[in-house]
Amino acid sequence: MSIAHYPTLEEFLAAPWSEVAKVAPNTMIYAPGGTRRSAVLQGIEPWSDEYVQWARIHSMQSIDLIFQHGIRYLLTPALTPGNLLEVNQYRDQIFQRVDWVLAGPESLADYAERGWRVRLIGDIHLPELQKTAQKLIDNTPAHADHLLCWTVVTETETPWQRLLMLIKETGAETVLQAIRTLYGEDIPPASLYLAFGKPTIDFGIVPPLLLGDLQCYWTQQPGYSLDQAQLRTILYDYAYLRKTWREEKLERAKAVRDHQKLWEAGPVLGLGQRPGPFWYPAATPAVTWAEGD
């Protein structure tokens, strides 16, 4: 794709939402992390009621921003296997807090104001989560332009175990049938993934069968740091810079030598360092290049 075929980043950052929406993915997975780290930096005690209230407000703001940019289906984790391995009062109160954040009066009012359809997927058969799942069904539309799926996985193996059990019971023979069986509706596989911290992917966050041609990004800013400039920069890379495949390979092969310095000095993405108890990406060598190098 020639650079003349797509806008500059500056143009994209300033474009109307309707223009950005034309190149946005149908389905996205948004997995913010480091939320308690971010709360500490703002003087909020982790595991406190103030933290939970703060997290709910900021998660809604991030979700709203994503939907405004054209994504129609959003999957975001409410509970992952790691949450249940934690100690102290956070674990003891986790299911009550999950219910309040996902389906409490404040969140139900936010969903109604924005017209979102909201569902709980994953381990919804657990007794502690059945009321939460039902409240979302009862209080959000059956059909809407935007579907928010809160995902709950208590053990990494349980989504696969449940999937295999349901396929055996129903006789589902295609991926589409299996998606309907496991999630109750047709959810297009995700093609954009935004998470935090270490570059890892697991089925505690990415639901089985909903992993499409997944383009992945990991921010190192903790908490709900997503803003319009960051999201649009990611969407720009997703929509334009990563689309390098060409049916005609000859010209692409000739271009390899034009950028020889890049391939000779290429970094290993994913290497890190340990500042105290945290992981952080290691600095990579700077590589300068220009057309014709």
Image (tube, rainbow, N blue to C red):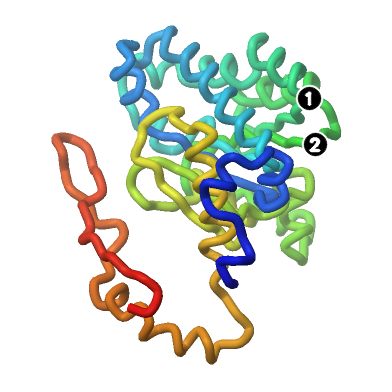
The residue singled out by tag 1 in the image is 115
Tag 2's secondary structure? loop
Kindly identify the residue that appears in the image at 59 percent across and 47 percent down.
12
Quadrant for the C terminus in the image = bottom left
Quadrant for the N terminus in the image = bottom right
Kindly identify the residue that appears in the image at 59 percent across and 23 percent down.
60
Q: Amino acid at mark 2?
A: Asp
The residue singled out by tag 2 in the image is 145
Regarding residue 177, the answer to whether it shows in the image is yes
Q: In the figure, residue 125 lies in which quadrant?
A: top right
Coordinates of residue 230 in the picture (x, y in percent): 48, 39
Kindly identify the residue that appears in the image at 50 percent across and 46 percent down.
233
Q: In the figure, residue 123 lies in which quadrant?
A: top right
Tag 1's secondary structure? loop
* CA distance for labels 2 and 1: 8 Å
Decide: is 81 above or below 118: below
Coordinates of residue 87 in the picture (x, y in percent): 31, 23
Q: Amino acid at mark 1?
A: Gly
Q: Is residue 78 left or right of residue 260?
A: right
Decide: marks 2, 1 in contact (CB < 8 A)?
A: yes
Regarding residue 166, the answer to whether it shows in the image is no
